[in-house]
Image (cartoon, rainbow, N blue to C red):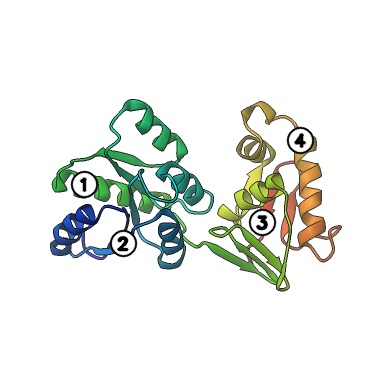
Amino acid sequence: MSEITLLLIEDEPQVRRFLRSSLEPTECKLLEASTGQAGLDMAASRHPDVILLDLGLPDIDGIEVTRRLREWTPTPIIVLSARGQEPDKVAALDAGADDYLTKPFGLPELLARIRVAQRHAELRGDRKDAVLTIGDLRIDLANRVVTRAGEDVRLTPIEYKLLATLVRRAGQVLTYQQLLKEVWGPRYSTQKQYLHVYMGHLRAKLESDPARPRFLVTESGVGYRLKSE
């Protein structure tokens, strides 16, 4: 368990104290946040290996925190919650959590879940960067801010979702079907015209010459790729 950085997003001081004292002997580095927003900010700036998340936070519900994290990072999320009902577990997992432990829980089980989460992340080769800079284009997924040459770029929700999907797999070719399913949903997997229209909108806003894109390139007959170099 050495050299693992954990981010604990938990508003109950007694739980934070318990985990702090319990995890210190394991040589884990523990970061702590008492609100959802503080946790989101810390996840973006400190790049933890695993996030431990309470659902009952004072400012943002843990389910929403999970959704926001999943907009830009694949870092493993283990929910630690007093909500033990099946619908709560399903909602957290559907929002993007990797695992769920109901309070009270034993430390050995938590450590085992952390080890499993880290192994899965290593196998996937997860990238934790919240900000991608390509030329004069800067995309900050944690704060949902896109700038070009230092100027804010206004994107519609669909345009942003399409761009964020490409950014999370920068350098990889994503097929038309993959993008349609992730951005619009499975029912739209054959509606290529949607994708062509919105890709045109993105290029008009992000490329200096939309007719000859430098970043948002077409892989003929296959899909699109965001060039990261």
Query: Distance from label 4 to label 3 (Cα)?
Result: 18 Å
- Residue 135 in view, yes or no: yes
Tell me the quarter of the picture where residue 46 sits. Answer: bottom left
Q: Quick one: label 1, few (<14), some, or many (20+) residues within 10 Å?
A: some
Query: Distance from label 1 to label 3 (Cα)?
Result: 38 Å
Number of marks: 4
Q: Are marks 1 and 2 in contact (CB under 8 Å)?
A: no
Q: Amino acid at mark 3?
A: Leu
Query: Distance from label 4 to label 1 (Cα)?
Result: 45 Å
Residue 27 x/y as whole percent: 18, 65
The numbered mark at residue 110 is 1
The residue closer to the viewer here, 67 or 120, is 67
Nearer-N-terminus badge (1/3): 1
Q: Are marks 4 and 3 in contact (CB under 8 Å)?
A: no
Query: Distance from label 3 to label 2 (Cα)?
Result: 34 Å
Q: Is residue 18 left or right of residue 81?
A: left
The residue closer to the viewer here, 180 or 30, is 30
- Residue at 19% from the left image edge and 54% from the top image edge: 14
Q: Are marks 3 and 2 in contact (CB under 8 Å)?
A: no
Where is mark 2, residue-wise?
A: 32
Mark 4 vs mark 2, foreground winner is 2
Nearer-N-terminus badge (3/2): 2
Residue 94 x/y as whole percent: 45, 34
Where is mark 3, residue-wise?
A: 226
Up-down relation of residue 2 to residue 89 (above or below) = below
Quarter of the image with the C terminus in it: bottom right
Q: Amino acid at mark 2?
A: Glu
Residue 135 x/y as whole percent: 69, 71
Tell me the quarter of the picture where residue 113 sits. Answer: top left
